[in-house]
Image: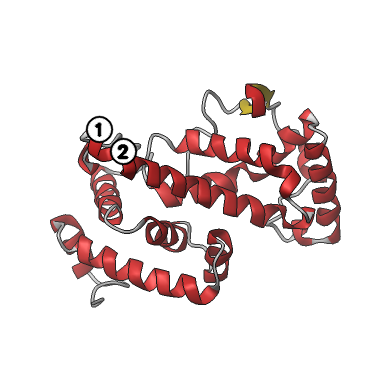
Amino acid sequence: MVTSALPRSRGELLTPGRATVRLPPPREETRARAPDEGSPEGSAAGSADGSNRLVEGLRRRDPDARTELVRRHLPMVERLVAAALGPDSEIPDVVHDVFVRALEGIGTLKDPRALVGWLSTLAVFTARDKIRRRRRWRWIRFLAPDELPEAPAHGADADTRATLQAAYRALETLPTDERVAFGLRFVAEMELTEVAAACGVSLATIKRRLARAETGFVAAARTSPLLTARLGRGGRWRDHE
């Protein structure tokens, strides 16, 4: 979803104290030994052992463990941050901040088997903080949503990019928590239980939050001729009130 994995380059990550972790090229044997935890292979007992070793290495500040953390979980973090922020030139910086926070806070993770969920929640909360800071200072910067830097979806045509920008301008009108939940559910296409876990709330709470988000999004979308036309073609929100 995001073409540039991390700020500065895909080959490095600034860590606590601003030390730099260099990411070597992927190796087949490394991928074979450490399958992604979200895959069927990663759900096996061997994955739990791998998570234990990874977290132990991170707590020791092992550079190889830091490299493996980024290699294994970068796609998930990118997907969650991009879903929450939408087209945004600051996505790489937020992804960077997620991993810095993870490295700084790894000592607070009590169960290494919960690493994926913990990192998902950290990604969502970091993106949410970015949205809140941006809204807090926008009145000083005199920066309207139309003037925000654009990061167009690569490979999309002009109409699709315009629609995407209009959709995220509509989402700008939502409270931060509702906007984040909407992005995770309908952009990242996460299951309700996953959205609730990532946001750190109950399933009932996330359902209520999403219901409000959908209502607010449709109301805002109907003020945009481009989005109104899309809504009128059918789909989930055509008759939403």
Q: Which mark is residue 137?
A: 2
Q: Nearer the viewer, residue 236 or 20?
A: 20
Residue 164 seen by the camera: yes
Q: Nearer the viewer, residue 146 or 39?
A: 146
Quadrant of the drawing holding the C terminus: bottom left
Q: Residues within 10 Å of mark 1 (few under 14, many from 20)?
A: few
Q: Which mark is residue 133?
A: none
Task: Name the residue type under label 1.
Answer: Arg
3 sits left or right of 88 in the view: right
Q: Residue at x 80, y 43 (%)?
A: 54
Q: Which mark is residue 141?
A: 1
Q: Residue at x 44, y 61 (%)?
A: 181
| Dot 2 and dot 1 residues touching (CB under 8 Å) | yes
Residue 149, x across and y down, in percent: 30, 34
Residue 3 seen by the camera: no
Q: Nearer the viewer, residue 71 or 27?
A: 71
How far is the residue under mark 2 from the one under mark 1? 6 Å
Circle 2 sits in a helix, a strand or a loop, which is it? helix
Task: Name the residue type under label 2.
Answer: Trp
